[in-house]
Image (spheres, coloured by chain):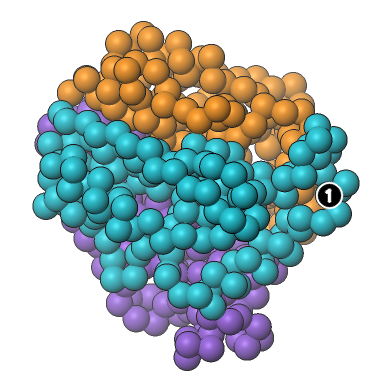
Chain colours: A purple, B orange, C cyan
Amino acid sequence: MKSFRKELWFDIPSRRAFINITPEIKQCLKESSIKEGLVLVNAMHITASVFINDDESGLHQDYERWLEKLAPHEPVSGYMHNRTGEDNGDAHLKRQVMGREVVVAVTDGDLDFGPWEQIFYGEFDGRRKKRILVKIIGE
Amino acid sequence: MKSFRKELWFDIPSRRAFINITPEIKQCLKESSIKEGLVLVNAMHITASVFINDDESGLHQDYERWLEKLAPHEPVSGYMHNRTGEDNGDAHLKRQVMGREVVVAVTDGDLDFGPWEQIFYGEFDGRRKKRILVKIIGE
Amino acid sequence: MKSFRKELWFDIPSRRAFINITPEIKQCLKESSIKEGLVLVNAMHITASVFINDDESGLHQDYERWLEKLAPHEPVSGYMHNRTGEDNGDAHLKRQVMGREVVVAVTDGDLDFGPWEQIFYGEFDGRRKKRILVKIIGE
């Protein structure tokens, strides 16, 4: 069994954003030279997500609006967590809806994806350096 | 390390449905002859889910009602995504709540499940052919 | 490829709770002597979660309040599932928001975690014995 590990860093200038990281994950797969196995991609921070969906800007606006409705940023005082001095209570909730990680099959050296699947980094508390982990195991 | 891959196809006649696919996944496991490892089961489409819960019809009605409340199908014009000509904006949101994939332990050649765990395909934009991926790795 | 399997049991005295299980998972990793691979940690019951977030009590109160808003326990008669005689319809919904499982990378014999990541058992229908599964594969 082979294994491969790499961190990818982000410094998103806004509080929230969705970034397509599929090309970077494909590049990791190439570097790993693993042909059959599984790739795990996870946020290493607890106010960010990695998820799979469509690369369509209207949909991303829908996600943004919907997550704000489910777990609004304001009022900041509405979250017990923010009594610690943080203002990111909402980001910890949004991340649970969108998920921490994805596991993707590796087949013939490529991501084994349906027609529209793309991997995204979901940032809910940006404006600082944060990272994700790519771990691939297989042969 | 051995690996096994299979696609399972669905053509659900309604917009939304929950289908128990546990027998099909067990059959894949048998075909793979893998005894120890992990099985990944994921929707290959971005308006569908694979998740684990109870095979109880009342609960499935509760999920249907709850997801419609969290992300209603109507009004279709309420989603930016639908400006692309689609009417499935809600389905992309529902799928995030229910999840894209499950990873299940394989022990002694069987799904290593608790007493009530069953694997479901969750369709949120049916009436056309769609598929899931089963990938098993192990020995 | 090596594999390791262990069940961890809980008997939570309240209906709902969040328990940090990171030390127990690290102990499993040590017992497995697996240095590179993946660890799967999943609830074996369908009214409980395993998830990764921050070990901060204010945040846990935020989760509790938020999940009660998204899927309230009362009125019990509001869930079709409860016509089976159960009163845990809400717990099946809460578990979908928080997730069934986590997959964590194993690197150099340790959980490959960001600075604040901790693994939690999320109980939504306690006051009885329930368990989670830890499965590790790798080398």
Kind of residue sitting beneath label 1? Val
Image quadrant containing the N terminus of chain B: top left
Residue B112 visible in this rendered orientation of the protein: yes
Image quadrant containing the C terminus of chain B: top left
Q: Position of residue B87 (x, y in %)?
A: 73, 44
**A77 left or right of C101?**
right
Residue A135 visible in this rendered orientation of the protein: no
Q: Residue at x 33, y 23 (%)?
A: B107
Q: Position of residue A98 (x, y in %)?
A: 52, 56
Name the quadrant containing residue A38. top left
Q: What residue is pinned by disc 1?
A: C76
C32 vs A67, nearest the viewer: C32
- Count of residue discs: 1
- How many C-alpha atoms fall within 10 Å of the one at disc 1: few (<14), some, or many (≥20)? some
Name the quadrant containing residue B7. top left
Q: Residue at x 86, y 54 (%)?
A: C75
Local secondary structure at mark 1? helix
Q: Position of residue B112 (x, y in %)?
A: 41, 26
B13 vs B107, nearest the viewer: B107
Pointer 1 indicates a residue of which chain?
Answer: C
**C12 left or right of C93?**
left
Q: Is residue C93 above or below residue B54?
A: below
C71 vs B129, nearest the viewer: C71
Q: Residue at x 72, y 28 (%)?
A: B56
Q: Position of residue B120 (x, y in %)?
A: 59, 29
